[in-house]
Image (cartoon, rainbow, N blue to C red):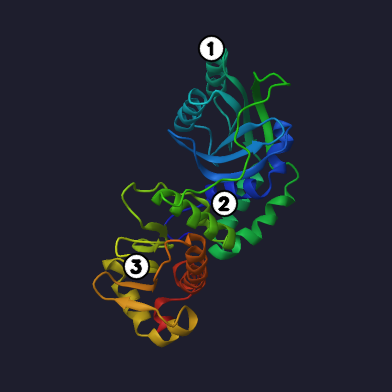
Amino acid sequence: MSKQGSKKETIFTLFLKEHPEIIQEIIGIPIEKMKMEYNNGSQRVDLHGVNKEKKIDIYVECQITTADMNHLEKTKDLINNTAEGYVIWIAAKFRKDSYIKEIQELLRNSPRKYINFFAVEIHPDVVELLKYLNNQYELDVLTNLKVINKIQQPLRLVADHLKMPPTHIGKAFIGERQYDFSREDEIKDYLLDQLLERMPYYLNFHNSKKHLQNSKVMQIGGGLDEVIYHCAVRDVRNRAFVEIRFGRSKEEWYQSFKDREDLLRREIHPLIRFNENNRSIGVYLSPNPNDVPGVVMKLVDVFERFIKYFSQYTYGNKRIKDSA
């Protein structure tokens, strides 16, 4: 699937997001509102959800390799920065009991934390299926995740440490998010959420982006090195746009698509424009500052056409010479 590196861990995390019952069976409580690459303030967590009844946050760290020191430190940091909740560390294998014992010792030395910890191993057959999915066409992976359901027990509990009283009610936010459109980061969050809702099959939308404070433009990977989507609801030139940019090493790609300008106008948008200076192909609109949702919906429509057209080349089997 990924020409420039494996996305097996992202695929596995997406599988857990789409099938929360797998984790629910391990921890014993329902999970809702699951989100990948959750921003927990000081760090990002692979997967986050909430239990509405108990108002408890659920944090999941995933690795499809053997448990290592790096993920141990990430899990410890998560516990240190969390007062209450469920913390789940999933790995292909826990060969060193010392890692689990170190987490348990940390929790024993933190009497004021109401945290339930779970160490969970992945069935070896799941890892093999992830290799298979990693070689699929990117836009088909979400549909093909169902092959993992053939594994009767994809996850197995290895150890736990429970500190939360059964009757405890937490403080997790369980309402619907309200966006502040006076803030650039909130506008970009809203745009990304709408892109994800429309196109859950495009894996890069599942990983929430860390926004640059002074940038009005959001960047999303296009599937290859030096192929990047740029998108803005309102940039410094007061434009709403979607564009794909090609780096210097992809000059041939840009020229090949430019040679098929009429085709791109039919397949993507009649107002598509080309810029030789930065090798970009884009659609540019005049935004209504009083209607951010309306502008975003127009951008999502355009972005979907970009994804479906260009992914045939950046992720699929079509060669760049086939475009000309």
Give the answer, above or below, for where 159 lies relative to 278: above
Residue under the image location 68 percent in, 25 percent down: 169
CA distance for labels 3 and 2: 26 Å
Q: Residue furthest bottom?
A: 262
Give the answer, above or below, for where 244 lies relative to 39: below
For label 2, count other residues whose C-alpha is less than 10 Å away and answer few (under 14), some (14-19) or many (20+): some
Q: Residue furthest right?
A: 152
Residue under the image location 39 percent in, 71 percent down: 286
What kind of residue is marked 3?
Arg
The answer to whether the residues at label 1 and label 2 have Cβ atoms under 8 Å apart is no
- x, y (%) of residue 223? 44, 62
Dot 1 falls on a residue whose secondary structure is loop
Quadrant for residue 21, please give it.
Answer: top right
What kind of residue is marked 2?
Ile
Residue under the image location 46 percent in, 79 percent down: 269
Dot 3 falls on a residue whose secondary structure is strand
* In this view, the mark in front (1 or 2): 1
- x, y (%) of residue 309? 49, 74
Q: Which residue is at the front of the view, 322 or 264? A: 264
For label 1, count other residues whose C-alpha is less than 10 Å away and answer few (under 14), some (14-19) or many (20+): few
Question: Which residue carries the number 3 mark?
Answer: 245
Sequence-first tag of 1 and 3: 1
The quadrant in which the C terminus is found is bottom left
Q: Which residue is at the front of the view, 303 or 159? A: 303
Sequence-first tag of 3 and 2: 2
For label 3, count other residues whose C-alpha is less than 10 Å away and answer few (under 14), some (14-19) or many (20+): many
Question: Which residue carries the number 2 mark?
Answer: 11
Q: Which residue is at the front of the view, 9 or 241? A: 241
Query: In the image, is 223 to the left or to the right of 252?
Result: right
Sequence-first tag of 1 and 2: 2
Quadrant for residue 256, please give it.
Answer: bottom left
Q: Which mark is residue 109?
A: 1
